[in-house]
Amino acid sequence: LTSEVSDKFTLIGGIDARYYKGEHFRRLENLLNADAYYSQSDDNGTRYLTEESPATFGNFFDNSYKDADNPNVLAYHNDGLVTWLGLFGQLEYTQDRLSAFIALTGSNQGFKRVDYFNYLESDPDRETAWQNFLGGTVKGGLNFNLDERNNIFVNGGFYSRQPLFDNVFINFVNDVNEDAKNQSVTAFEVGYGYRSQSFDAKVNAYYMTWGNRQFDITSENDIGEEIQYQFENVAQQHIGLEVELAYRISRTFSLTGMLSVGDWKYNNNFTARGQNLDTQMPEGEFTIFADGLKVGDAAQTTMSIGASWEFIRNFSIFGDFYNASSLYARYDVDDDQFLMPGGEVVKLPSYSLVDLGLSYKFDLGNSLRAVARFNMNNVLDEVYVSELVTNIVDDPSTSENEFYNNRGVYGFGRTWNAGFKLYF
């Protein structure tokens, strides 16, 4: 809903409601020429499964597993239910060279778990009570036009995000995590913009913290009992500067540029107390030394330079140079090497790519237009590692480096594609 409160104020509001039910199970798809499968996972009784429920194309969900006389399900069977009710409101203000807004959201998210295998049909704990969590956002921003070409802006916000389903119910049963809390994201941005007939520029600096992330790990004690550690207050900090440039030298020739420099890292160590899953008693502590570890799986510094030239009417050639650096391996912060100070994250070599393309515009008459394009990516066929999915650091005592020990993904070599768009 939108309401023009006055010539300066505009009020926007809304409401949304959602419901989700996920059914989780394994079913018998193929007996592999056996007569039956002996299922022992259901606390309500063991049984022989004799009917197959193959998943055929176009029928990925087969309800035969619900057959009351011979339920064809094994290993586990539980439902996850989620409800959501949210409200949204935003007030916008505009006068002369100043514009501003403030936005508020609020929501209630409820979680329920029904476990058909780990509890008897008569057990009231088979179905949990609804676990409700409040969340919301507060955002605001301001833009001031210094003159026709220059503006400054600032934005900020706070987001309280409800925990994930797996953080609410733990141990793969209906145990409710009494320590489950909302995650929080706090972000600020300040920037400057310039616009003219031939040149545009935008510069902004950002700061973001992502706090109170939660996860758990399970390990065994000296006598083989499982100990679960629930970690809280896991936090990351993202700081960076971004620049975008566009220069129209003439009607037919233009340049673009982009630079993004970031510093993304964990900003604390975190400790969890363990719980013995057999005795349900507290047992031991677990500390992860993450303070200062770089966030992996995305280049923290990138830059590009591009050019476009219409050298014949309607016929253009364009190209881009792109460089990525400060790229670190993907890793789990609970890896063994971070259980003591001094853990490291593998840094990948920087790489540069050149892309080129051609386009031609057609005027087909009767308001019909078309564009044909040809693109070639990584023209120089650069060989580079775009991602490491493990984090094994270099051992200086051997001649092997981290690329011999890790698993990763090479970037695409030289590729090309063509396209045709019709406008009418």
Image (cartoon, grey):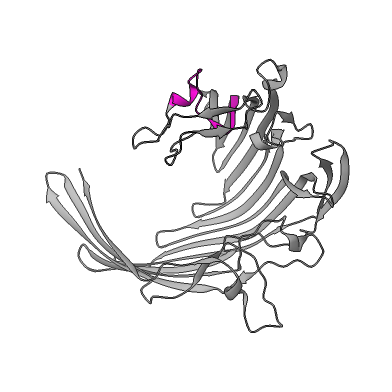
Q: Is residue 130 above or below residue 401?
A: above
Horizontal side, residue 35 vs residue 11: left or right: left
Percent x, y for residue 362? 17, 56
Q: Quadrant of the C terminus?
A: top left
Which residue corresponds to the image point at 64% horizontal and 38% vertical from the top-left? 139
Q: Is residue 138 magenta?
A: no
Residue 94: which quarter of the image? top right
Percent x, y for residue 8? 55, 30
- Seen from the viewer's position, the closer of residues 296 and 352 is 296
* Residue 128 visible in the snapshot: no
- Seen from the viewer's position, the closer of residues 58 and 214 is 58
State which region is magenta. Answer: 63-89
Percent x, y for residue 162? 67, 34
Percent x, y for residue 42? 62, 28
Q: Is residue 76 magenta?
A: yes
Which residue corresponds to the image point at 51% horizontal and 73% vertical from the top-left? 351
Which residue corresponds to the image point at 67% horizontal and 48% vertical from the top-left? 188
- Count of marks placed on residues: 0
* Residue 273 visible in the snapshot: yes
Horizontal side, residue 201 vs residue 307: left or right: right
As drawn, the residue found furthest toward the front would be: 35
Q: Is residue 201 above or below residue 19?
A: below
- Seen from the viewer's position, the closer of residues 46 and 342 is 46
Residue 14: which quarter of the image? top right
Q: Is residue 393 above or below residue 124?
A: below
